[in-house]
Amino acid sequence: MCAKLSFSGQGLSEPLAQLLLRELEDLAVSAARAAGRFIVQERPRGLGVTDTKSSINDIVTVMDQQSEELLRAHLLSARPDDAILGEEGGASRGTSGITWVIDPIDGTVNYLYEFPAYCVSVAAVIGDAGTPGQWQPVAGAICNPLTNEIFHARRSGGAHVRQGDQDTAIGVNPVEVLLHSLVATGFGYRPEVRARQGEVVAAILPEIRDIRRAGSAALDLCAVACGTVDAYYESGLNPWDLAAGWVIAMEAGAVVSGLNNTGPGEAAVVAAGPGIHRSLLSRLEALAPLR
Ligand code: IPD
Protein backbone atom coordinates (compact mmCIF):
# COMPACT_ATOMS: atom_id res chain seq x y z
CA MET A 1 0.00 0.00 0.00
CA CYS A 2 1.04 3.61 -0.44
CA ALA A 3 2.65 5.69 2.26
CA LYS A 4 0.03 7.59 4.25
CA LEU A 5 -0.12 11.28 3.38
CA SER A 6 1.33 13.03 6.41
CA PHE A 7 3.48 16.01 7.13
CA SER A 8 3.56 15.17 10.83
CA GLY A 9 7.14 13.90 10.47
CA GLN A 10 8.01 17.45 9.57
CA GLY A 11 6.20 18.81 12.62
CA LEU A 12 3.75 20.83 10.52
CA SER A 13 0.37 22.00 11.74
CA GLU A 14 -2.53 21.86 9.25
CA PRO A 15 -2.34 25.58 8.21
CA LEU A 16 1.41 25.24 7.68
CA ALA A 17 0.90 22.04 5.70
CA GLN A 18 -1.54 23.95 3.46
CA LEU A 19 1.00 26.73 3.01
CA LEU A 20 3.68 24.18 2.11
CA LEU A 21 1.39 22.44 -0.40
CA ARG A 22 0.62 25.77 -2.04
CA GLU A 23 4.33 26.61 -2.22
CA LEU A 24 5.06 23.20 -3.80
CA GLU A 25 2.27 23.60 -6.36
CA ASP A 26 3.43 27.09 -7.32
CA LEU A 27 7.01 25.91 -7.67
CA ALA A 28 5.92 22.92 -9.80
CA VAL A 29 4.04 25.33 -12.08
CA SER A 30 6.95 27.74 -12.52
CA ALA A 31 9.46 24.90 -13.10
CA ALA A 32 7.23 23.11 -15.64
CA ARG A 33 6.54 26.41 -17.43
CA ALA A 34 10.27 27.26 -17.69
CA ALA A 35 11.25 23.82 -18.99
CA GLY A 36 8.25 23.74 -21.36
CA ARG A 37 9.36 27.02 -22.90
CA PHE A 38 12.93 25.70 -23.14
CA ILE A 39 12.10 22.47 -25.01
CA VAL A 40 10.03 24.36 -27.60
CA GLN A 41 12.38 27.30 -28.11
CA GLU A 42 15.54 25.18 -28.20
CA ARG A 43 14.16 22.25 -30.21
CA PRO A 44 16.66 21.75 -33.04
CA ARG A 45 15.20 22.29 -36.50
CA GLY A 46 14.74 19.14 -38.62
CA LEU A 47 14.94 16.86 -35.60
CA GLY A 48 12.57 14.25 -37.07
CA VAL A 49 14.48 13.98 -40.33
CA THR A 50 17.96 13.42 -38.92
CA ASP A 51 19.33 10.55 -40.96
CA THR A 52 20.50 7.95 -38.47
CA LYS A 53 18.58 6.53 -35.55
CA SER A 54 21.44 6.97 -33.10
CA SER A 55 21.95 10.64 -33.98
CA ILE A 56 18.19 11.24 -33.56
CA ASN A 57 18.28 9.57 -30.17
CA ASP A 58 21.36 11.56 -29.19
CA ILE A 59 19.70 14.88 -29.97
CA VAL A 60 16.53 13.98 -28.09
CA THR A 61 18.61 12.73 -25.16
CA VAL A 62 20.54 15.99 -25.07
CA MET A 63 17.29 18.00 -25.01
CA ASP A 64 15.95 15.71 -22.26
CA GLN A 65 19.13 16.16 -20.22
CA GLN A 66 19.22 19.93 -20.64
CA SER A 67 15.55 20.26 -19.73
CA GLU A 68 16.16 18.16 -16.63
CA GLU A 69 19.18 20.27 -15.65
CA LEU A 70 17.02 23.37 -15.94
CA LEU A 71 14.33 21.76 -13.76
CA ARG A 72 16.86 20.67 -11.13
CA ALA A 73 18.42 24.14 -10.93
CA HIS A 74 14.99 25.83 -10.77
CA LEU A 75 13.69 23.56 -8.00
CA LEU A 76 16.86 23.49 -5.90
CA SER A 77 17.37 27.24 -6.06
CA ALA A 78 13.97 27.62 -4.34
CA ARG A 79 14.18 24.53 -2.09
CA PRO A 80 17.78 23.35 -1.71
CA ASP A 81 16.97 20.67 0.89
CA ASP A 82 14.60 18.66 -1.32
CA ALA A 83 15.49 15.41 -3.06
CA ILE A 84 15.05 14.88 -6.81
CA LEU A 85 14.27 11.79 -8.88
CA GLY A 86 14.52 12.46 -12.61
CA GLU A 87 14.23 10.38 -15.75
CA GLU A 88 17.67 11.38 -16.99
CA GLY A 89 19.80 12.22 -13.96
CA GLY A 90 18.56 9.64 -11.45
CA ALA A 91 18.18 10.40 -7.75
CA SER A 92 19.76 13.06 -5.56
CA ARG A 93 19.23 13.06 -1.81
CA GLY A 94 17.57 15.71 0.34
CA THR A 95 16.69 16.30 3.97
CA SER A 96 13.26 18.01 3.80
CA GLY A 97 11.08 14.90 3.26
CA ILE A 98 9.96 16.21 -0.15
CA THR A 99 11.17 14.58 -3.38
CA TRP A 100 10.63 16.15 -6.79
CA VAL A 101 9.82 13.52 -9.40
CA ILE A 102 10.41 15.04 -12.81
CA ASP A 103 10.02 14.10 -16.45
CA PRO A 104 11.84 16.69 -18.59
CA ILE A 105 10.04 15.57 -21.78
CA ASP A 106 7.14 13.11 -21.57
CA GLY A 107 6.15 12.01 -25.06
CA THR A 108 9.68 11.89 -26.44
CA VAL A 109 8.67 10.13 -29.66
CA ASN A 110 6.09 12.86 -30.30
CA TYR A 111 8.79 15.45 -29.58
CA LEU A 112 11.03 13.78 -32.12
CA TYR A 113 8.36 13.94 -34.84
CA GLU A 114 6.92 17.27 -33.71
CA PHE A 115 3.61 15.49 -33.17
CA PRO A 116 1.90 18.01 -30.86
CA ALA A 117 1.50 15.96 -27.69
CA TYR A 118 4.46 16.29 -25.36
CA CYS A 119 4.98 17.98 -22.04
CA VAL A 120 7.07 18.56 -18.94
CA SER A 121 5.90 16.89 -15.76
CA VAL A 122 6.93 18.03 -12.25
CA ALA A 123 5.62 16.53 -9.00
CA ALA A 124 6.39 16.90 -5.31
CA VAL A 125 6.01 13.55 -3.57
CA ILE A 126 6.33 12.18 -0.06
CA GLY A 127 7.62 8.72 0.82
CA ASP A 128 10.33 6.73 -0.92
CA ALA A 129 9.99 7.64 -4.61
CA GLY A 130 12.48 4.92 -5.54
CA THR A 131 10.32 2.12 -4.10
CA PRO A 132 7.06 1.16 -5.85
CA GLY A 133 4.02 1.61 -3.63
CA GLN A 134 5.90 3.66 -1.03
CA TRP A 135 5.25 7.17 -2.27
CA GLN A 136 2.43 9.56 -3.12
CA PRO A 137 2.35 12.87 -4.97
CA VAL A 138 1.18 15.88 -2.97
CA ALA A 139 1.41 18.56 -5.65
CA GLY A 140 2.26 18.69 -9.33
CA ALA A 141 2.17 20.51 -12.63
CA ILE A 142 2.24 19.41 -16.27
CA CYS A 143 3.06 21.95 -18.95
CA ASN A 144 1.88 21.38 -22.51
CA PRO A 145 4.08 24.02 -24.13
CA LEU A 146 2.33 23.86 -27.51
CA THR A 147 -1.12 24.74 -26.15
CA ASN A 148 0.28 26.96 -23.36
CA GLU A 149 -1.69 24.96 -20.83
CA ILE A 150 -0.35 24.15 -17.39
CA PHE A 151 -2.39 21.55 -15.53
CA HIS A 152 -1.75 21.71 -11.80
CA ALA A 153 -3.02 20.48 -8.45
CA ARG A 154 -2.19 20.03 -4.79
CA ARG A 155 -3.75 17.70 -2.25
CA SER A 156 -7.22 18.97 -1.25
CA GLY A 157 -6.82 22.03 -3.47
CA GLY A 158 -8.69 20.84 -6.56
CA ALA A 159 -7.24 20.62 -10.09
CA HIS A 160 -6.87 23.54 -12.45
CA VAL A 161 -5.59 24.41 -15.87
CA ARG A 162 -3.73 27.71 -16.30
CA GLN A 163 -3.65 29.57 -19.60
CA GLY A 164 -1.80 32.85 -19.36
CA ASP A 165 -2.75 34.19 -15.92
CA GLN A 166 -6.16 32.53 -15.93
CA ASP A 167 -6.82 29.42 -13.78
CA THR A 168 -9.88 27.30 -14.59
CA ALA A 169 -11.08 24.43 -12.42
CA ILE A 170 -11.21 21.08 -14.20
CA GLY A 171 -13.11 17.87 -13.50
CA VAL A 172 -13.69 14.39 -14.87
CA ASN A 173 -16.66 13.46 -17.01
CA PRO A 174 -19.73 12.05 -15.24
CA VAL A 175 -19.99 9.00 -17.55
CA GLU A 176 -21.50 5.88 -15.94
CA VAL A 177 -21.26 3.24 -18.65
CA LEU A 178 -18.02 1.66 -19.87
CA LEU A 179 -19.47 1.06 -23.31
CA HIS A 180 -19.92 4.84 -23.68
CA SER A 181 -16.39 5.66 -22.54
CA LEU A 182 -13.47 7.02 -24.51
CA VAL A 183 -10.39 5.32 -23.08
CA ALA A 184 -6.75 6.35 -23.48
CA THR A 185 -3.84 3.96 -23.16
CA GLY A 186 -0.17 3.70 -24.00
CA PHE A 187 2.45 1.11 -24.87
CA GLY A 188 5.95 0.43 -23.59
CA TYR A 189 9.05 0.35 -25.74
CA ARG A 190 9.92 -3.38 -25.51
CA PRO A 191 8.44 -5.56 -28.29
CA GLU A 192 7.34 -8.41 -26.00
CA VAL A 193 5.61 -5.93 -23.67
CA ARG A 194 3.84 -4.28 -26.61
CA ALA A 195 2.67 -7.65 -27.92
CA ARG A 196 0.86 -8.34 -24.63
CA GLN A 197 -0.45 -4.76 -24.39
CA GLY A 198 -1.87 -5.19 -27.90
CA GLU A 199 -3.79 -8.29 -26.76
CA VAL A 200 -5.26 -6.36 -23.84
CA VAL A 201 -6.33 -3.47 -26.09
CA ALA A 202 -7.92 -5.93 -28.51
CA ALA A 203 -9.99 -7.42 -25.69
CA ILE A 204 -11.11 -4.02 -24.32
CA LEU A 205 -11.87 -2.35 -27.65
CA PRO A 206 -15.29 -3.94 -28.34
CA GLU A 207 -16.44 -2.97 -24.82
CA ILE A 208 -15.78 0.80 -24.97
CA ARG A 209 -16.66 3.76 -27.20
CA ASP A 210 -13.13 3.97 -28.65
CA ILE A 211 -9.45 4.02 -27.79
CA ARG A 212 -6.89 6.87 -27.93
CA ARG A 213 -3.09 6.57 -27.89
CA ALA A 214 -1.66 10.09 -27.68
CA GLY A 215 1.91 9.14 -26.72
CA SER A 216 2.30 10.95 -23.39
CA ALA A 217 1.16 9.28 -20.19
CA ALA A 218 1.28 12.60 -18.32
CA LEU A 219 -1.02 14.26 -20.86
CA ASP A 220 -3.29 11.19 -20.86
CA LEU A 221 -3.83 11.69 -17.12
CA CYS A 222 -4.54 15.39 -17.73
CA ALA A 223 -7.03 14.35 -20.41
CA VAL A 224 -8.91 12.28 -17.82
CA ALA A 225 -8.73 15.24 -15.43
CA CYS A 226 -10.30 17.69 -17.88
CA GLY A 227 -12.68 15.25 -19.58
CA THR A 228 -11.19 15.05 -23.08
CA VAL A 229 -11.16 11.30 -22.43
CA ASP A 230 -13.17 9.34 -19.85
CA ALA A 231 -10.49 6.96 -18.63
CA TYR A 232 -6.86 5.92 -19.00
CA TYR A 233 -4.95 2.75 -18.22
CA GLU A 234 -1.41 1.64 -18.88
CA SER A 235 1.18 -0.76 -17.52
CA GLY A 236 4.94 -0.25 -17.29
CA LEU A 237 5.01 3.42 -16.28
CA ASN A 238 7.89 4.93 -14.35
CA PRO A 239 7.27 7.26 -11.37
CA TRP A 240 8.14 10.34 -13.48
CA ASP A 241 5.52 9.43 -16.14
CA LEU A 242 2.88 9.13 -13.45
CA ALA A 243 3.56 11.36 -10.43
CA ALA A 244 2.14 14.77 -11.43
CA GLY A 245 -0.71 13.33 -13.52
CA TRP A 246 -1.80 11.15 -10.60
CA VAL A 247 -2.43 14.09 -8.23
CA ILE A 248 -3.98 16.20 -11.01
CA ALA A 249 -6.41 13.44 -12.06
CA MET A 250 -7.25 12.61 -8.46
CA GLU A 251 -7.95 16.24 -7.54
CA ALA A 252 -10.13 16.49 -10.66
CA GLY A 253 -12.31 13.72 -9.22
CA ALA A 254 -10.79 10.62 -10.83
CA VAL A 255 -10.14 7.40 -9.00
CA VAL A 256 -6.50 6.51 -9.67
CA SER A 257 -5.45 2.99 -8.73
CA GLY A 258 -3.48 -0.10 -9.63
CA LEU A 259 -5.03 -3.56 -9.91
CA ASN A 260 -6.27 -5.69 -6.99
CA ASN A 261 -6.26 -3.03 -4.26
CA THR A 262 -2.79 -1.72 -5.00
CA GLY A 263 -1.81 1.87 -5.67
CA PRO A 264 -0.94 3.02 -9.18
CA GLY A 265 2.54 1.99 -10.30
CA GLU A 266 4.55 -0.02 -12.78
CA ALA A 267 2.16 -3.00 -12.85
CA ALA A 268 -0.82 -0.82 -13.76
CA VAL A 269 -2.38 2.62 -13.60
CA VAL A 270 -6.15 2.87 -13.98
CA ALA A 271 -7.59 6.39 -13.87
CA ALA A 272 -11.26 7.11 -14.44
CA GLY A 273 -14.26 8.94 -13.07
CA PRO A 274 -16.01 7.13 -10.20
CA GLY A 275 -18.89 6.14 -12.48
CA ILE A 276 -16.77 3.77 -14.59
CA HIS A 277 -13.59 3.09 -12.61
CA ARG A 278 -14.91 -0.10 -11.00
CA SER A 279 -16.09 -1.66 -14.27
CA LEU A 280 -12.87 -0.79 -16.14
CA LEU A 281 -10.78 -2.04 -13.24
CA SER A 282 -12.67 -5.36 -13.04
CA ARG A 283 -12.25 -5.91 -16.76
CA LEU A 284 -8.49 -5.19 -16.57
CA GLU A 285 -8.05 -7.38 -13.49
CA ALA A 286 -9.65 -10.24 -15.42
CA LEU A 287 -7.16 -9.68 -18.26
CA ALA A 288 -4.04 -9.28 -16.06
CA PRO A 289 -1.12 -9.40 -16.37
CA LEU A 290 -1.28 -6.35 -18.63
CA ARG A 291 2.34 -6.63 -19.83
C1 IPD B 1 6.40 7.38 -22.48
C2 IPD B 1 5.09 8.08 -22.79
C3 IPD B 1 4.13 7.11 -23.45
C4 IPD B 1 3.89 5.90 -22.61
C5 IPD B 1 5.20 5.21 -22.29
C6 IPD B 1 6.15 6.18 -21.62
P1 IPD B 1 8.55 8.97 -22.52
O1 IPD B 1 7.27 8.26 -21.77
O2 IPD B 1 4.53 8.59 -21.62
O3 IPD B 1 2.87 7.68 -23.67
O4 IPD B 1 3.04 5.02 -23.32
O5 IPD B 1 4.90 4.15 -21.41
O6 IPD B 1 7.38 5.54 -21.37
O7 IPD B 1 9.48 7.86 -22.91
O8 IPD B 1 8.02 9.70 -23.68
O9 IPD B 1 9.11 9.87 -21.44
Image (cartoon, grey):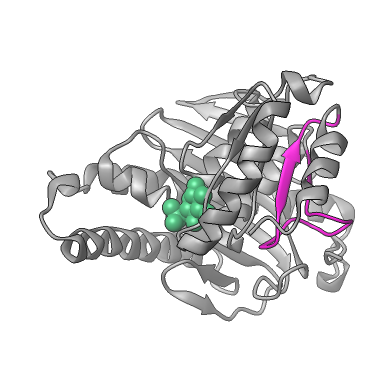
x, y percent for residue 64? 34, 60
Residue at x 88% of width, y 67% of height: 8
- From the viewer's perspective, is residue 59 above or below residue 174? below
Q: Is 157 situated left or right of 67 in this image?
A: right
Q: Nearer the viewer, residue 140 or 64?
A: 64
Q: Is 270 situated left or right of 143 in this image?
A: right
Q: Quadrant of the N terminus?
A: bottom right
Q: Nearer the viewer, residue 260 or 154?
A: 260
- From the viewer's perspective, is residue 199 above or below residue 180? below
x, y percent for residue 25? 63, 47
Residue at x 84% of width, y 59% of height: 262
x, y percent for residue 141? 57, 45
Residue 73 image-quadrant placement: bottom left
Q: Nearer the viewer, residue 277 or 161?
A: 277
x, y percent for residue 20? 72, 55
Residue 158 image-quadrant placement: top right
Q: Which residues are magenta?
A: 255-274
Q: Is residue 74 visible?
A: yes
Is 97 part of what is drawn in magenta? no
Residue at x 36% of width, y 32% of height: 146
Q: Is residue 22 visible?
A: no
Is 268 part of what is drawn in magenta? yes
Q: Quadrant of the C terminus?
A: bottom right
Q: Is 35 situated left or right of 185 in this image?
A: left
Magenta stretch prevailing secondary structure = loop
How many marks do you count on the picture?
A: 0
Residue at x 58% of width, y 30% of height: 211
Q: Nearer the viewer, residue 148 or 51?
A: 51
